Amino acid sequence: QVQLVESGGGLVQPGGSLRLSCAASGGILWINTMGWHRQAPGKQRELVATITRDAITNYADSVKGRFTISRDNAKNTVYLQMNSLKSEDTAIYYCNADILGLGAVPKTYWGQGTQVTVSS
């Protein structure tokens, strides 16, 4: 059973940094694009960043220059380095990945989410 497990969320002051991690496990044959989304209270879930297997990245305009997405294909893990955090970055952050598992049908999987709170 494929699952994604996030870690690294927490409370940080404005201007601070956090690093999120998301590890995929469970009968994985291949992982294509991985990414991060976030959902703030009362708002829709929005894309933060994505990274292909070949490390081509894409960012939301609101995080460009502050956030960096990366991945370790050997560890089936994606990271999100978040610098210069602002109060508007407060949200639950979800990782997702396009995974070919033992079932041989590619599917998008989601993590359970990790809370990031930016506040003084």
Image (cartoon, rainbow, N blue to C red):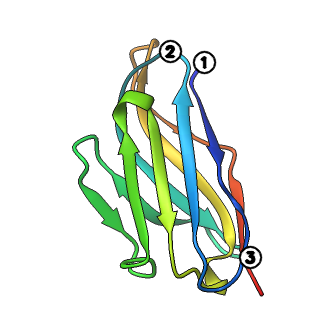
Label 3 or label 2, whichever lies nearer to me, is 2
Q: Residue 1, which numbered label? A: 1
Left or right, residue 110 beside residue 76: right
Residue 90 x/y as whole percent: 68, 75
Residue 99: x %, y % from top left? 42, 30
Kindly identify which residue carries mark 2. 27
Q: Residue at x 58, y 80 (%)?
A: 85
In percent of width and height, residue 37 lies at 53, 60
Labels 2 and 1 touching (C-beta < 8 A): yes
**In percent of the image, x 60 and y 85: which residue is there?**
86
Q: Please, what is the three-letter code of the amino acid marked with disc 3? A: Gly
Q: Earlier in the sequence, mark 2 or mark 1?
A: 1
Q: CA distance from mark 3 to mark 1?
A: 32 Å
The amino acid pointed to by label 1 is Gln
Q: Earlier in the sequence, mark 3 or mark 2?
A: 2
Element assignment for label 1: loop
Is 23 or 58 nearer to us in this picture? 23
Circle on res. 42: 3
